[in-house]
Image (cartoon, rainbow, N blue to C red):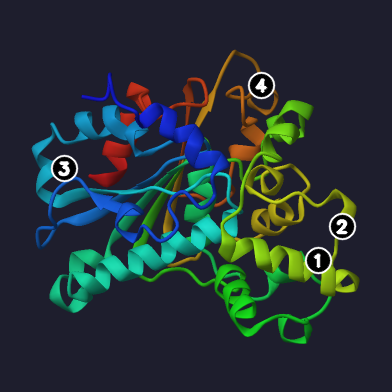
Amino acid sequence: SLVESRAWADEYRGFVRGDSREGDEDMRLAALEPHRRGRMPVVLIHGTASSPFRWADMVNDLTEDPRIRENFEFWFFAYATGNPIPYSALLLRESLQAAVQGLGGEGADPALGRMVLVGHSQGGLLARMVTTDAGTRLWDAFSHRPLDELRLDASDRDLLRRALFVEHLPQVERVIFSATPHGGSYLTEFSATRLLSRLVRLPAALAGVGIEALAGNADALTYDISRWRPGSLAGMTPGSPFIRAISGLPVSPAVRAHSIIPALGDGPLAERSDGVVRYESAHLEGVDSELVVHSSHSVQSNSAAIEEVRRILL
């Protein structure tokens, strides 16, 4: 059914149009079928210039297994992938909280408190933002001064607080990082990628925050304003304030973590990549398991990766 679908064109439209899903709450989080008590949600989070349709092969294969069908159900998170990562992660967090509340909460079904997040590429960074306890460290990467000392409207201050002062979501029990650039992606340093990032149109909720923060609080920022670029691509650039901060934040001890890392070619892992993310960037210390598979960056349909997700779930 996807062959003639407009989904593929919409992936790129969703990258450059940061407001394409704004106000469309029902489209951010969707389930393959209605929730059934006792089944644990597996939340699939796509990467940059992508969409939930990229998970079709994995979901088709996994749902052929009666043990998976009996114990799990699949939810899909969709977002405008050109937006800043903390903002997209905030939408993910609040969408999951609203879904659990709408289904009656963990009191009505304890399985809702045993979520598994599977994030591919940028989606893995969103998942990491939902499974870590940041304290002030994310904020400190951008500002020398406390948030309350900056000249901001109350609504903008609240948005920044919710996006950057994050704690792990207690309903998430396990996270699987797939081709995730914890240390950034070297492709974001190319001139063509920097040009592409200029096409991103931020949603209105963010545009005002950026302009006001830059104009009225330049002396508090930790980076050169003239080199500031909004959006997810700048955030995933190696050495960016966001990447430096997030790479130093461990996954919460309350969450079990796993890595699936695609790599092309042969030779030492430290010298290999999937064409987008180097192994050393995707590698995360302290995870419960790490599997390296021979694949390009789009590893969601790789049979070894799908079997690894099955193994972890079971």
Which label was assigned to residue 214? 1
Marks 4/1: CA–CA distance:
43 Å
Query: Which residue type carries mark 2?
Result: Ile
Label located before the other in sequence (3 or 4) = 3
Marks 3/1: CA–CA distance:
49 Å
Q: Quadrant of the N terminus?
A: top left
For residue 22, above or below residue 9: below
Query: Which residue type carries mark 3?
Result: Ile
Q: Position of residue 55 (x, y in %)?
A: 33, 34
Label located before the other in sequence (2 or 4) = 2
Q: Quadrant of the C terminus?
A: top left
Q: Residues within 10 Å of mark 3 (few under 14, many from 20)?
A: some
Residue at x 86%, y 73% (from the top left corner): 220
Q: Position of residue 111 (x, y in %)?
A: 19, 64
Label located before the other in sequence (1 or 2) = 1
Q: Provide the residue designation for mark 2.
A: 225
Residue 49 as seen in the image, left or right of residue 118: right
Q: Residues within 10 Å of mark 2 (few under 14, many from 20)?
A: few
Label located before the other in sequence (4 or 1) = 1
Label located before the other in sequence (2 or 3) = 3
Which label was assigned to residue 268? 4
Residue at x 32%, y 52% (from the top left corner): 27
Residue at x 77%, y 82% (from the top left corner): 151
